[in-house]
């Protein structure tokens, strides 16, 4: 019997190749999307789970309250003292380890490279589970001039992982110092918040640890290991009590000197929570911070796509059942029971689902590189073959098979043999369920298309909006520090090439500080050290006063410029001549010019107060080199040759300012692509379902179409009669989707201080796209039915 069922299933596949392909392809695509997103979510929730002592590892964090008591801010950074003092004085803390990001110039042979690394305490490998290929985990970081390399870094510097005992030269205070490789570690797992190519011992002095003022320095991560049975809340209370007691004197001194600084509360964050934390993400040497909202959105998309694919499977199976009505009738006449028929059709469903699953695995393998690029992951197909995931796939297979096969089996097995043999049966009545599912499918497709249009528009806005300065053809060359004499020499040498138009210098990274204005008012601002030509080369407008000038020697000692936001924050009506008091350094500066607000950060950040100085006490860290348009190749060669000649022991690298700005929107670019692919897949699978329904409708109305044609109806009128019902459903789905999409889009755009305005054309464009695709899907079968010979459709059997 089962052999017979199998033969019939194969025969039906061969006889209906197009429909079988569409049926299997739709389900396979839905399953592949679900599998890829399961991979993504599995990776997200597995971060740091490989750490053997993970349940007992916590990061020390702070919750800072403002002096006015309004608002709280959490911070994952700590300083020198928190780790050693808490571990020595708070019961329940076994040990601590500090992790600080760093960057060192490393010389290997004649080549000098800038190497990102982590500075850590010597017990790093006893707390964290990073296996070593060679070396002793207990002692490899115990000596000051030791370095641990990853296997990739060892390959890079020495050509093999056999690097223990070899030496690299690390630049310290302008001199290359030998460091011995004491261990080589395996490559850090993909799902780790701590990733490193090199580790160096954390260096500090006894003075640093004993200085109570370091309670208020925050620049590294401190992890503590708790006793397994300790109450975390009790440890937090102990930390807070000790902090308040130990820092009482220095807090009082700071309050007298700087005013009320608010309150700090020390808390413990489980290491397992870092990766998906919104308030306390991995930072400052810790990597791969993620938003859990991404997982929720992708899970929703996967669920909807899989559900739609299963619905389509039902549509097409039921639609093609009309061709098998007589087979079912004959089986019943010769004694076939309904149970046997259900078994047969469920078996066919299992067979088709199995093919779809196999196809889905192949699609996952083919699409994984693209998905990794979209999601910024490095997922592997081997991730799929985890015991829990395999169990999940089995459950998914069973549920898919039941969902996709049970309803058609019930419908098909319920046919009356008399009606089927005389072609007098009606497949269904009003079809409210099927129509409702069509509305659901296209509402979701419309929602995703609208979302894609809006994300595209916002991304386009972010990447094309004028920033308030000219970032075109500007090459950035980093070196810290550029001493003043070095900067002047570099500039003069560069300008000897006619392709170099201007050269200016600025501090690297983002500096921020605070100062007093209007007597005692304190404001925070971004603190920029520039040279006299910076505003000119970047074409940043001056709206009042004057710019820095060599004609005024006092500019380097007592003058500053500020932006409009600084003036607004300070509440100044007449800002020129006002004083900015850096009370902590006993320095006062006079405002000589007002700079027009420009987006010195990405458009994801609101423009804040900004202050400019040309103080000789601060070094530069970045050269801004304006080159002639179209001279990239020759200009870059000259810049590199000049840099190497003047700074032979410093690593050279460059980037274009406009490309650096674009990198600020990598997240939006990824989500633009993800939403686009999600919308395309959803609309494609929805169209498969609509295709199935149009087949079903055409089959049911065969004689009606024949009568219409005999009575003189044109092809266009028949097509219209068959299409309008479906287009009504699509139109209803758009009416449902548009207000939901408007609300969701407005909520999403609220995250951006600078954003597009929602406009009617975005929703009309999405609606037109959905209607056109739906019409193209339906019209194929409508035309085929309308052009059929009425004699064939009206022939009586």
Image: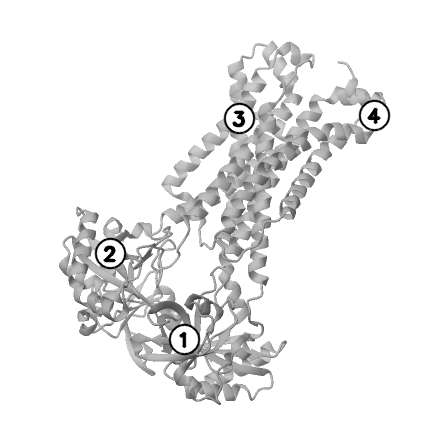
- Label 1: state its secondary structure: strand
Marks 1 and 4, the one that precedes in the sequence: 1
Q: Nearer the observer, disc 1 or disc 4?
A: 4
Return the disc, 1 or 2, that comes first in the chain's sequence. Answer: 1
Q: Which mark is residue 713?
A: 4
Mark 2, Cα crowd under 10 Å, few <14 / some 14-19 / many 20+, is many
In which image quadrant can residue 437 be found?
A: top right
Q: Are marks 1 and 4 in contact (CB under 8 Å)?
A: no
Note whether 119 is above or below 374 in the view shown.
below
Q: Nearer the viewer, residue 423 or 643?
A: 643
Q: Earlier in the sequence, mark 2 or mark 3?
A: 2
Q: Is residue 525 left or right of residue 205?
A: right
Q: Earlier in the sequence, mark 4 or mark 3?
A: 3
Q: Is residue 13 depicted above or below 342 in this figure?
A: below
- Residue holding disc 1: 113
Marks 4 & 3, CB-CB < 8 Å contact: no
**Front of the two marks 1 and 2:** 2
**Residue 66 seen in render:** yes
Is residue 162 rendered to the left or right of residue 449? left
Q: Residue 266: which disc?
A: 2
Mark seen at residue 405: 3
């Amino acid at each position: 019997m089962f052999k017979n069922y199998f033969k019939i299933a194969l025969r039906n596949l061969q006889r209906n190749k197009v429909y079988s392909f569409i049926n299997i392809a739709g389900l396979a695509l839905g399953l592949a999307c679900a599998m890829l997103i399961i991979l993504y979510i599995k990776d997200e929730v597995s971060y740091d789970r490989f750490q053997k002592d993970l349940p007992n590892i916590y990061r020390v964090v702070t919750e800072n309250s403002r002096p006015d008591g309004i608002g709280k801010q959490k911070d994952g950074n700590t300083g020198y003292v928190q780790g050693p003092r808490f571990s020595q004085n708070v019961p329940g803390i076994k040990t601590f380890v500090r992790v600080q990001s760093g960057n060192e110039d490393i010389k290997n042979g004649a080549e000098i490279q800038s190497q990102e690394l982590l500075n850590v305490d010597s017990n790093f490998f006893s707390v964290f589970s990073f296996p070593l290929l060679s070396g002793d985990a207990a002692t490899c970081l115990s000596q000051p001039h030791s370095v641990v390399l990853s296997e990739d870094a060892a390959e890079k510097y020495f050509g093999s992982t056999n690097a223990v005992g070899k030496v690299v030269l690390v630049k310290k205070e302008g001199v290359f110092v030998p460091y011995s490789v004491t261990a080589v570690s395996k490559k850090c797992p993909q799902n780790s918040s701590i990733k490193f190519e090199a580790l160096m011992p954390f260096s500090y002095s006894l003075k640093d640890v004993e200085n109570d003022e370091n309670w208020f320095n925050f620049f590294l991560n401190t992890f503590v290991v708790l006793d397994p049975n300790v109450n975390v809340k009790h440890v937090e209370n102990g930390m807070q009590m000790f902090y308040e007691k130990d820092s009482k004197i220095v807090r009082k001194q700071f309050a007298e000197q700087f005013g009320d600084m608010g309150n700090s509360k020390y808390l413990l964050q489980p290491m397992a929570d870092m990766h998906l934390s919104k308030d306390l993400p991995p930072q400052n040497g810790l990597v791969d911070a993620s938003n859990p909202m991404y997982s929720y959105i992708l899970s929703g998309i996967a669920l909807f796509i899989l559900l739609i694919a299963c619905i389509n499977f039902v549509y097409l199976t039921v639609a093609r059942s009309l061709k098998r009505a007589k087979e079912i009738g004959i089986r019943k006449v010769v004694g076939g029971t309904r149970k046997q028929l259900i078994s047969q059709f469920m078996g066919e469903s299992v067979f088709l689902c199995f093919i779809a699953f196999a196809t889905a695995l192949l699609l996952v393998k083919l699409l994984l590189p693209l998905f990794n690029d979209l999601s910024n992951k490095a997922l592997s197909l081997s991730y799929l073959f985890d015991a829990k995931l395999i169990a999940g796939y089995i459950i998914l297979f069973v549920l898919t098979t039941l969902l996709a096969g049970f309803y058609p089996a019930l419908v098909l097995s319920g046919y009356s043999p008399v009606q089927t043999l005389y072609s007098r049966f009606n497949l269904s009545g009003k079809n409210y369920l099927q129509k409702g599912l069509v509305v659901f499918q296209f509402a979701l497709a419309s929602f995703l298309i609208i979302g894609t249009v809006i994300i595209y528009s916002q991304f386009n806005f972010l990447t094309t909006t004028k920033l308030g300065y000219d970032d075109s053809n500007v090459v950035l060359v980093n070196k810290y520090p550029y001493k003043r004499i070095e900067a002047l020499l570099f500039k003069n040498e560069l300008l000897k090439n006619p392709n170099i138009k201007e050269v200016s210098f600025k501090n690297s990274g983002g500096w921020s500080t605070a100062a007093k204005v209007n007597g005692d008012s304190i404001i925070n601002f971004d603190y920029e050290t520039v040279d006299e030509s910076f505003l000119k080369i970047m074409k940043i407008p001056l709206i009042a006063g004057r710019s820095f000038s060599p004609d005024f020697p006092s500019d380097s000692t007592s003058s500053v410029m500020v932006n409009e936001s600084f003036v607004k924050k300070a509440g100044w009506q007449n800002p020129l001549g006002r004083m900015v008091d850096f009370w902590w350094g006993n320095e006062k500066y006079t405002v000589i010019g007002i700079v027009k607000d420009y987006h010195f950060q990405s458009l994801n950040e609101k423009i804040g107060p900004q202050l400019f100085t040309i103080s000789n006490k601060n070094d530069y860290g970045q050269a801004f080199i304006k080159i002639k348009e179209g001279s990239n190749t020759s200009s870059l060669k000259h810049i590199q040759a000049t840099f190497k000649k003047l700074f032979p022991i410093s690593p050279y690298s460059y980037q274009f300012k406009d490309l650096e700005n674009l990198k600020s929107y990598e997240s939006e670019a990824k989500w633009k692509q993800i939403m686009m692919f999600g919308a395309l897949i959803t609309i494609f699978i929805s169209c498969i379902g609509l295709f199935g329904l149009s087949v079903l409708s055409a089959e049911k109305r065969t004689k009606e179409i024949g009568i219409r044609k005999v009575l003189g109806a044109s092809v266009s009128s028949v097509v219209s009669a068959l299409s309008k019902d479906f287009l009504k459903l699509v139109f209803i789905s758009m009416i449902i989707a548009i207000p939901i999409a408007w609300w969701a889009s407005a909520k999403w755009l609220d995250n951006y201080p600078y954003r597009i305005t929602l406009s009617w054309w975005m929703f009309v464009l999405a609606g037109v796209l959905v209607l056109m695709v739906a019409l193209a899907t339906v019209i194929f079968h409508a035309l085929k039915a309308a052009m059929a010979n009425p004699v064939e459709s009206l022939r009586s059997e």
